[in-house]
Image: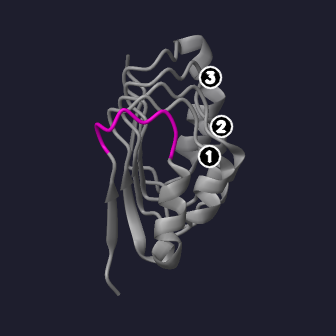
Amino acid sequence: MDTVVSDLSDCKLISFPDGVFKVLRSCTDKIHKITLANNEVKALTNKFFSTFTQLRELDLQGNVLTKLPDAVGNMEHLVSINLSNNKFSEFPERLTAVRTLELINLENNQISEKNGDLVNRNKLHLTPQYSSLNIVK
């Protein structure tokens, strides 16, 4: 099966374009990596995660995200998510539901030790599949 990579980096996007959903609808099961790095994305919708269910890698670094929708917790194949250089003030709790995740990068966000919540870290450490969690400022 051919893997499709969607790279929409550096496009000054503020959201995921509806037109892209329409163009890609026939091959969403083949899309394993989406890069939306270095845009101005403020939020992703549940539709994004329910459409691209086969994602393995998601690169959202360099946007202005403050949270993720609940549907991210339903991702069954996601291995890596890069959320560095965004505006998160707390750890995205729904990521703990993604059993396939191995790498989470939250570097250079606004997560303080207090907001980073050791409970969330403990949940991640109890789950052996995480090979890398980076929330350093």
- Which circle marks residue 45 in the picture? none
Q: Amino acid at mark 2?
A: Glu
Residue under label 3: 117
Residue 51 in which image quadrant: bottom right
Dot in front, 2 or 3: 2
Q: Residue at x 58, y 46 (%)?
A: 126
Q: Is residue 85 left or right of residue 123?
A: left
How many numbered marks are there?
3
Q: Is residue 11 above or below residue 99?
A: above
Residue under label 2: 93
Residue under label 1: 96
Query: Is residue 100 shown to the viewer in this render?
Result: no
Callout 1 touching callout 2 (CB < 8 Å): yes
Q: Residue at x 34, y 39 (%)?
A: 37
* Region in magenta: 9-16
Q: Amino acid at mark 1?
A: Thr
> Looking at this view, is 126 or 21 the one in front?
21
Coordinates of residue 68 in the picture (x, y in percent)? 61, 38
Q: Please tell me whether mark 1 sits on a helix, a strand or a loop.
A: helix
Coordinates of residue 18 in the picture (x, y in percent)? 56, 53
Q: For the C terminus, give its image quadrant.
A: top left
